[in-house]
Amino acid sequence: MNVGSAVKEPGFRDSVDLMFNRAAALLELSPGLEEKIRVCNATYIVRFGVRLRGKIQTFTGYRAVHSEHMEPVKGGIRYAPEVDQDEVEALAALMTYKCALVETPFGGSKGGLCIDPREYEEHELELITRRFTYELAKRDLINPSQNVPAPDMGTGEREMAWMADQYARMNTTDINARACVTGKPLNAGGIHGRVEATGRGVQYALQEFFRYPEDLAKAGLKGKLDGKRVIVQGLGNVGYHAAKFLSEEDGCRIIGIIERDGALSSAQGLDVDAVREWIVRHGGIKGCPAGDFVEDGASLLEAECDILIPAALEGVINLGNAERIRAPLIIEAANGPITFGADDVLRNRGTVIIPDLYANAGGVTVSYFEWVKNLSHIRFGRMQRRAEEAHHLLLIDELERLSADKGLGWELSPDFKRRYLRGAGELELVRSGLDDTMRTAYQSMREVWHERDDVHDLRTAAFIVAVRRVASSYRAKGL
């Protein structure tokens, strides 16, 4: 079967609905409430003109609001030529379930602009972004208390700073204007650890999975992350940070990296930073001396490894290649990288899939922290850091005094003293909060996965946890 046969599968939006339906069938929801949760509440389509290069160019943008069971609604804005209504509505639905699963107090939303950002100069992108922001903000589709975008594919800190500034220009008396978007640069109200957040969340998700030998056994794995062979598809922001942290901190071997123009492989493990630098300089992976080049990059998805991390676009694992996927464990760093049909194939073969609505929730989790920081108008750690250091110093001084008085000869190493005395700053607190979130969310999925005989995979378990929480919110509203 070739990849072309995947066109017979449901589209991305239908796949999300089918996955929802599979979980909803196992819950006792009234038909009306089930339908209310499933449907997308509203989608706004805007077409606006910007004068560029001596003429007016018209652009089409979208902002979908899936669920307002909690407000504000939250979700990224992506810049890509393939953006359409179905895609943003599917992504908005995933955001609803993702936020519910990791217990961030948001509904789900998503936005997109049909544009290839590589075709425009920086000043042109700024003009386009500011006009798009204006069109959304004047309808409260960007607003600290109603709809809070974030970066997604094709956007980053730069675009979020432009959006925040444009919103502030339109709302000069709004003291909370900086909270209108997240993922901003630090000097524009951002938070330490946001850029790395989604990749760091993937790492924490794998660390939590590997804490349970019985879960590892379901994937035919054992031991620790150290030495595990990993293939990463997509070395963008998410894939890069996930690969970097797993290799540098957990001892994984990144044996394959797949990009648009091919792939690199190395049985000994690739230098992630070297590959990333090459891609930034040359616009692709071809010619990189860090490993062996594979012309048909997608074929590396089917290579033997312990962990496969699809971290780019949706639908890369489909009915056309699912039977040939050999990884026993797949963690979805991207949104919807496995189609509904492929999910069935892999599940029936015993492949364990750590689903997207959990695995890539690090971004929205740290976005939540940034939003709280903007609303509180104070940096995390500013009030307590030095107090923590003073309390720790009291203990160190007392231990050293006792050692001297009793002639015990104890001597605390300088490195231990340095690390113990250091109070938690913003980055440490963000990482701690993210780690706790990923652990707690996994445990809630795992409980359903192991305790219910009718739940055979983590994706269904995740949807059950999320949908149950959304339903509870609607019931509390009187629906």
Image (cartoon, rainbow, N blue to C red):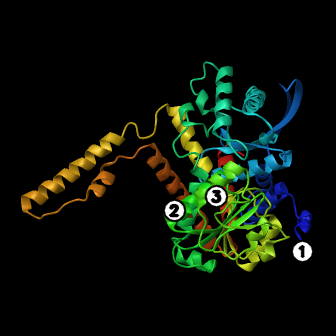
Camera-side residue of 117 and 376: 117
Q: What secondary structure is found at the residue carrying circle 1?
A: loop
Camera-side residue of 337 and 123: 123
Figure check: 335 above or below 298: above
* Viewer can see residue 101: no
Instruction: Give coordinates of residue 141: x percent, y percent.
Output: 73, 33
Q: Which residue is mark 1?
A: 1
Amino acid type shown at disc 1:
Met
Q: CA distance from mark 3 to mark 1?
A: 32 Å
Instruction: Give coordinates of residue 233: x percent, y percent.
Output: 71, 62
Q: Which residue is mark 3?
A: 275
* Viewer can see residue 223: yes
Mark with earlier residue (3, 1): 1
Figure check: 84 above or below 137: below
**Badge 2: few (under 14), some or many (20 or more) residues near its Cα, within 10 Å?**
few
Camera-side residue of 151 and 16: 151
Q: Nearer the viewer, mark 2 or mark 1?
A: 2
Q: What secondary structure is found at the residue carrying circle 2?
A: helix
Q: CA distance from mark 2 to mark 1?
A: 38 Å
Q: Residue at x 13, y 54 (%)?
A: 401
**Badge 3: few (under 14), some or many (20 or more) residues near its Cα, within 10 Å?**
many
Q: What secondary structure is found at the residue carrying circle 3?
A: helix
**Badge 1: few (under 14), some or many (20 or more) residues near its Cα, within 10 Å?**
few
Report the number of discs. 3
On the rendered structure, is 47 left or right of 204?
right
On the rendered structure, is 1 left or right of 67?
right
Mark with earlier residue (2, 1): 1
